[in-house]
Image (tube, helix red, strand yellow):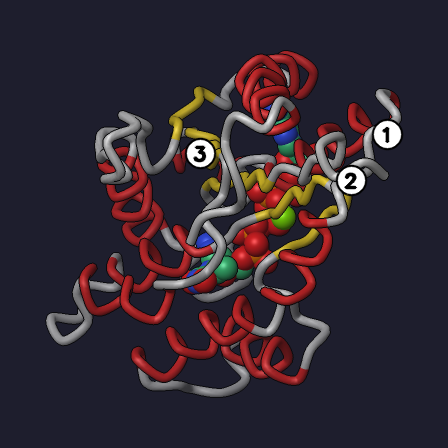
Amino acid sequence: IDPAEHRRGAFIVLEGLDRSGKSTQAKLMEQRFVELNKPVKGMRFPDRTTPIGQMIDGYLKSKVEMEDHAIHLLFSANRWEAVAKIKALVAQGTTVIADRFFHSGVVYSAAKGNPALNYKWARAPEIGLPRPDMVVFLDLNPEETARRGGWGAEKYENGEMQMRVRQLFRDLGKKDIGDWSGEKEVIVLDAGGGIEEVAEAIWELVRPRVEAVERGERGSLKT
Ligand code: Z5A
Ligand code: MG
């Protein structure tokens, strides 16, 4: 391949409350790339398949108790162990779609209300992770996500926690990433419509960003 022709892949993240439709939408987005003949790889966090991921799984299922900072660092470590893979995929031109990434890590820990674990502390172990080209927060009223199947079985799946998480994500929708580009930390998208409708709205946001990456306008993956 001519190096001038070789473009990196994009790194796209879907965030949202529990049951907001992240996994459903990540799959549908992946299919769009496949249909367009663009290489794509889906990933999810926590990745419960690794030894660290299994410890996280035990915590989320309330099989083991863990100190707030300790579990926070495990969630972060679970991302760090995937960094080499993400970078390699993106460098070879494959777009990576992640179902949650570090914004979940920071927001969920900060939402616990532990005075010893504020937003700044929670952000620190995430510094240096690849920065997504776009983070879309699927915004939905927690009362609605609760009506969808399976809610309520895991840690954090209670109304009060979900309300705080939603507020913190909405705040990130107003926060600049801080590199003068004017981009926000996350793009808040109303995810209350039907599955196809939401998929279309996500694609309208993601497609131009992916095309900018393909034209080389966004340079290499930032941290
Ligand atoms: N967590 C953390 O604390 N720190 C971290 O660093 C990370 C995570 C990465 C587990 O996450 C917990 O870990 C989570 C955050 C915390 N705690 N909470 N809450 P997870 O990613 O493993 O689990 P989840 O994503 O929260 O839950 P989920 O069940 O996978 O939800 P989802 O992927 O967003 O939803 P879904 O499976 O696509 O859809 C749920 C159902 O709704 C399903 O039946 C769909 O068919 C239906 N659905 C989807 N879209 C629609 C629409 N548009 N209309 C109607 N019905 C729909
Ligand atoms: Mg999911």
- The residue where tag 1 is placed is 34
Residue 110 in percent (x, y) is at: 24, 60
Q: Which of labels 2 and 3 is toward the front?
A: 2
- Is the CB of the residue bearing disc 2 within 8 angstroms of ligand 2? no
Earlier sequence position, callout 2 versus callout 3: 2
In which image quadrant can residue 176 be found? Answer: top left
Give the amino acid type for the residue marked by disc 1 in the picture: Val
Identify the element where label 2 is drawn.
Answer: strand
Q: Relative to 16, is 213 on the left or the right?
A: right
Task: Please tell me the numbered disc located at residue 124.
Answer: none
Does residue 151 appear in this view?
no
Give the amino acid type for the residue marked by disc 3 in the picture: Phe
Q: Residue at x 50, y 36 (%)?
A: 133
Does residue 171 appear in this view?
yes
Q: Work out which quarter of the rendered image holds the N terminus and state it.
A: top right
Give the amino acid type for the residue marked by disc 2 in the picture: Val
Residue 39 in percent (x, y) is at: 82, 37
- The residue where tag 3 is placed is 137
Q: Residue at x 49, y 87 (%)?
A: 64
Q: Are marks 1 and 2 in contact (CB under 8 Å)?
A: yes
Dot 2: within a 10 Å radius of its alpha carbon, few (fewer than 14), some, or many (20 or more) residues?
A: many
- The residue where tag 2 is placed is 40
Identify the element where label 1 is drawn.
Answer: helix
